[in-house]
Amino acid sequence: MITFERARQIALDTIGPTWVTDECGEYVVADYGFQDDRSWCLVDGGRRLVIDGDYSCQLVGRGSTLVDKKTGEVSSLNYLEDPERFDAMTEVGHHPPEDSVD
């Protein structure tokens, strides 16, 4: 099984090189996220969004980054495509209070 830390590195290696660095900064992956039995759901994006919490850097229409726990395949899924799946996910790592679902 792919670990959460490995999933973060896979995303950095896969998405990072194609990320357009602009005023929102370089591509980063938070050290916390979500999971279900199939995938890790990463909190990722430009540094100003992920680290600084600047939601003006949230890319409209960009889905959440998922990394398959068995294969390491990276995919994207929007909440509206499968809200039940997202709602059932559990937290991984230490979430800042503003990002916690509790």
Image: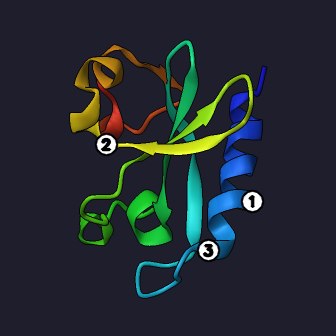
Q: Earlier in the sequence, mark 3 or mark 2?
A: 3
Mark 2 residue type? Asn
* Label 3 with label 2: CB-CB less than 8 Å: no
> Which residue does the image show at 42% across and 70% down from the upper left?
48
Q: Give residue 38's quadrant in the image.
A: top right
Residue pointed to by mark 3: 18
CA gap, disc 1 and disc 2: 22 Å
CA gap, disc 3 and disc 1: 9 Å
Residue 101, image x and y in percent? 29, 25
Q: Earlier in the sequence, mark 1 or mark 2?
A: 1
Element class at badge 1: helix
Residue pointed to by mark 2: 78
Residue pointed to by mark 1: 13
* Label 1 with label 2: CB-CB less than 8 Å: no
Q: Earlier in the sequence, mark 3 or mark 1?
A: 1
Q: Give residue 4's quadrant in the image.
A: top right
